[in-house]
Image (cartoon, helix red, strand yellow):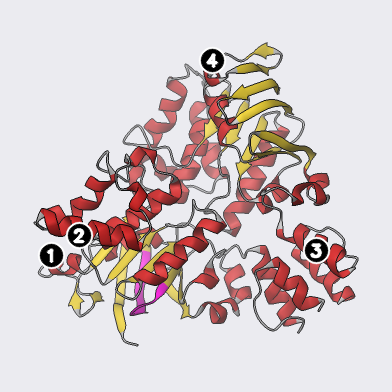
Amino acid sequence: MEIRFENVFYKNKLENINLKLNNDKINGIYNYNSFIKLMNNPKLLEKGNIFIDDKVYKNFDPKIISIVDKDKGFYTSKVIDEIYFYSKIRNYKSTTIKQDIICWLKEFGLDESILKRIPHSLSQTEKYFIKIICNLIYKPKIIIFKDIMNGMDYNNRKLIKKIINKLNEEGILIIVTSMDSNILYDLTEELFIFDRKKLLISGNTNDIYTDIEKLNNSKVDIPVFSRLTYKANKEKGVNLFYRKDVRDVIKDVYKNV
Amino acid sequence: MDNLVEINNLSYSYKDKTIFHNLQISIKKETTNLILGTNSSGKTTLIRILSGILPSENSINVNGIILNKKNIKKYLLSIGAVFFDDVNKFLFDKVIDELAFPLENLNYNKKDIMNRINEVSKLLEIQNCIDKKTGELTIFEQVKVLIGMSIMHNPKVIFLDNALSKLTNNEVKKLFKLLDRIKTNTTICITSSDMEHILSFDNVIVINEGKTLFNDIPNNVLQHDNELARSGFYIPPMIDLSLKLSFYGLVDEIIVDVDRMVDTLWK
């Protein structure tokens, strides 16, 4: 599965964008609004082309692409109806749909009794998880998670990370979007950073966040430990390594302070 | 400072699940308070109870008014509440109508309503939003307008459920400057599962498994980082680093600013 942008222009928001996302790796997008708008409605495209698996992407195809957006409301008055509704409008039919729902509920640590509840009575986290399940059940090939970890505690961050990895292993093209570079650093392998109409940088996430010089003149968010390492190296002459884990940073600092 | 809000022995269950068991919380006047809880810990439920949407009898006291059936009207005049995760946050097309609505409901005359709209919009720096359509507002403007609505009737306390989750760090900084102005009249309580902005608050109330785990200033709460982590809280990287470096005696306060941290470690 591959999404390809070729010389894409969109209003005064994107200018001559060329990029390629595929399902080999977990993709991350920083400053994602215009990207999501175009994926949701390719007719907005002014110039250039978007391809999905080498076919020109002209109309949003909800059977293939799913955009998980926490801020979207519920359409029905019962959780089970909501999950079926997503499949129904996509004409998705499967004999295992009920089992699939139960498997996903287990995966998210939710009890089966939630299916009978009114969406309004759910906690924000339960709503988010049900919304993810609604989007997984019809087996889309591309899933875009908008603002993925927003409002999640430690355990749920771990859980979502596990599920994202699992979906990626199953061959789904995963795109996670966030304005928090720490989340993108932790979660993604391939990163696309948009800044003022342009694709500022793209490539391996680790490479991007350990080569801060390129990001330094922009307004984009930089992971805190990368910034700390860069500043210590550059301004204080202290030779720290670029680390993701706080325990490694502490060891480095302890040795060098 | 006196306590403005007192929650005494509040118990609440949903079906078979106990959400709160003898919950005790006190909130001081003229403060900004973070009500911190992990996901599904009952933060929104608590705000619904405090707003009189969900039932409670005689467990809640705001400024001397006890929340019960008899006092509900008087009680509601002393509080304001906003649920930021609700999909349909606005009732009207235009911001000005949205701000006027709480006072129209209270039968204020047009002149007084306009005066208060001008006061509130100046306080929250939303003068340029007044004539806009609600659908045209940026997220930061939406948050400010909703807070504006909640203080139109001059309540003693406002409860803002998940007000910060969609804001950038810069926007949160700007918002706290505005909240500091509001808190002299109106005490502020914001719920969150996120500790990213914990140091911006005067006070932090941590709820866990239906009880109050801590109710203290942010620095004191953060000293319990191991317990917070065990309870499932996500500790933001710079706070985590600061706490651990302070354990090894390398810094003596919590530093969240990267530049300051580097300058402190390598003078």
The reply to the same-chain question for discs 3 and 2 is no
Is B65 left, or right, of A96 in this rendering? left
Q: Which residue is mark 2?
A: B115
Residue lying at 38% horizontally and 55% vertically, measured from the top left: B144
Q: Chain of mark 3?
A: A
Q: Which residue is mark 1?
A: B73
Which badge, 4 or 3, comes first in the chain's sequence?
A: 4
In this orientation, which residue lies closer to the viewer: A98 or A245?
Answer: A245
The residue type indicated by label 1 comes to: Lys
- Chain containing mark 1: B
Query: Do the residues marked 3 and 1 share a common chain?
Result: no
- Is the C-beta separation of discs 4 and 2 under 8 Å? no
Instruction: Give the side of residue B203 with respect to residue B47, left or right.
Output: right
Which residue carries the number 3 mark? Answer: A231
In space, the residues marked 1 and 4 are separated at their CA atoms by 52 Å
Position of residue A216 measured from the top left corner of the image (x, y, whole percent): 75, 52
**Foreground disc of the pair 3, 1:** 3
Q: Dividing the picture into quarters, in which one does residue A20 lie?
A: top right
Instruction: Kindly state the secondary structure of the residue where label 2 is placed.
Output: helix
Queried whether the magenta region covers residue B20, the answer comes back as: yes
Which residue lies at the image location 66% right of the left edge and 81% below the top edge?
B253
Magenta range is B19-32
**Distance between the Cα atoms at labels 3 and 1?**
56 Å
